[in-house]
Structures are given as structure tokens and as C-alpha cells.
Image: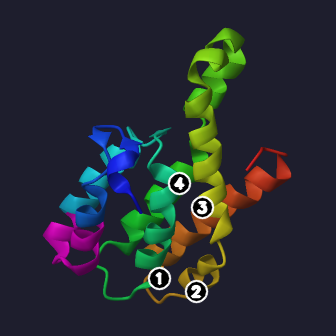
Amino acid sequence: MPWDTIKDSSGTAEAIPVLLHHVARGDEPTARAALATLRERICQYGFVVDQATAVTVPFLWELARLPQVTCRVQIVRLLKNIADARQWESTASAYPKLLHHRHDYVGWEREARRAVRAEQDVLRQLLGEPDPELAEAAAELASTLAAGRVSGSRA
């Protein structure tokens, strides 16, 4: 992945692989800190996605399924935030002229939601996890994804 050619909320996304590595292999404080930084870069404020979000999502799904990762619950919650993200789309609906100027942002939201939906089969594994907090977070994400299908929302 050419991380240096895509953008996250802080500029170039080239730090994302290092953050993912710390989430995957760090002790709990290191992993949580790395995930918090990653969250700010790909889903700022918990609802504003960026260009790098969709390409990061498959890595998040992979980390969520690994039992040795110490912050799986937070990863699943981040995936839910990404699946819920409609900041730019909602704004563009209210102010159609903005869509012309911010079309990329709306597209990034849709791509990010598609990326979350594309690997939702991992939820079956997570719903069966013995950690009740992880299973609950997975159920909330599953509900979000199901609601998106029912409401006719695009990706």
C-alpha cells in the first residue's frame, strides 16, 4: 500500500502501518495509545472519515479477529463508528452545492462503509467470543450494518 500517497486527517497516511503494528504487537497501554492515534487519523471525532479510512479497515478487521490483540473491543467500536459515518453525506444533502466542492469526502465515507461491510463475516467469530464486552461490541456493529441494509442506505 503506498501510504505516503494517501491522506488521513493529519496529512500523509504514512504513519498508519506503524500504528497498526503497535496495535497488533504492543502491550495493552501501547496498543490502546496507538489505536487512539489511529482513530484520530482515520475517523476523527468518531465520525469524520478520510481518504485513508477505507484502505485501513481490512487491517482493523484482521486485528479484531486476533485473540492476542489487547484492544479488540475498541477496534470493533472504531469499525462501528466508521460504519455510522455520514458527516459529509449529511452535510451535502442539506447543502447540495457543498457536494460539488466536497465530493471526495462523501465518496470516502461510502468507500469506508463498504470496506466495513465487505468483511462483516468476521462478526460471526466475534459474536461467539467468551469476552462479553467484545461480543456486545460485535452485536452493536452487526446491528448497525443490518440497519444500513434495511434503511436502504448506500453502502
Percent x, y for residue 18? Answer: 23, 65
Task: Give me the residue at 58% from left, 81% from top.
Answer: 127
Q: Which mark is residue 54?
A: 4
Picture quarter containing residue 101?
Answer: top right
The residue drawn where x is 82% and y is 46% is 151
Is 2 in front, or is 105? 2
Task: Report the disc number at residue 16.
Answer: none
Residue 22 within the segment the image draws in magenta: yes
Residue 89's x, y, as percent? Answer: 65, 30
Is label 1 or label 4 in front? 4
Quarter of the image where the N terminus is located: bottom left
In the rendered view, would you say 149 is above or below 109?
below
Return the residue nearer the eye: 124 or 58: 58
Residue named by callout 3: 116
Along the line of sight, the residue nearer the viewer: 16 or 2: 2
Real-space Cα separation, disc 3 to disc 1, in angstroms:
14 Å
Q: Is residue 96 left or right of residue 7?
A: right
Q: Which residue is mark 2?
A: 125
Residue at 57% x, 41% y is 108
Distance between the alpha carbons at the discs numbered 4 and 3: 8 Å
The Cα atoms of the two marked residues, 3 and 2, are separated by 15 Å
Instruction: Report the amino acid beneath label 1.
Output: Arg
Segment tinted magenta in the rendering? 20-32
